[in-house]
Amino acid sequence: MATGLLGQAAPNAAAYTTLYVVPATTFTVLGLSLCNRGSTTVSVRVALAAAATPAANGSEFIEYNAEIGANGVLERTGIMMSANKLLVIYASNANVSASAFGIETSTL
């Protein structure tokens, strides 16, 4: 079971990126940091999804078009995820760095 840093990415603009996948027979509690490295505001989305592209009805999003100001950060903590779920992120431009950190726990 992993602890500490679970995933990092600098996603492409306007594309969904899988940052982390919860292993089978495991649940994860994690925190997420999205850092805007740019000089303009960026919109971000975060989903706890069953697939690499979140559900079309929007039910899997925990952030949707949240704005991060220039050189700002959005942090979420206490995110609980069940086995096989994906942490999927999206940013309106390519100036975002994402880090997920937490702990995995076996369900067996």
Image (cartoon, rainbow, N blue to C red):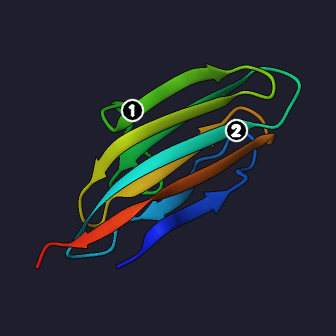
- For the C terminus, the image quarter is bottom left
The picture quadrant where one finds residue 41 is top right
The circle on residue 62 is 1
Residue shown at the point (77%, 35%) measured from the top left: 93
State the residue lying farthest toward the left.
108
Residue shown at the point (54%, 65%) measured from the top left: 5
Does 45 appear above or below 32?
above
* Residue highlighted by disc 2: 35
How far across and how far down the image is residue 26, in percent? Answer: 24, 71
The circle on residue 22 is none
Nearer-the-camera pick, 51 or 43 = 43
SS for callout 2:
strand
Residue shown at the point (32%, 59%) measured from the top left: 85
Left or right of 67: which side holds 104? left
The picture quadrant where one finds residue 50 is bottom left
Left or right of 91: which side holds 47? left
Sequence order check, earlier mark of 1 and 2: 2
State the residue lying farthest toward the front.
4
- For the N terminus, the image quarter is bottom left
Residue shown at the point (28%, 49%) measured from the top left: 80
Three-letter amino acid code at disc 2? Cys
How far across and how far down the image is residue 81, in percent? Answer: 29, 54
Question: Gap in Å between the C-alphas at discs 1 and 2?
Answer: 17 Å
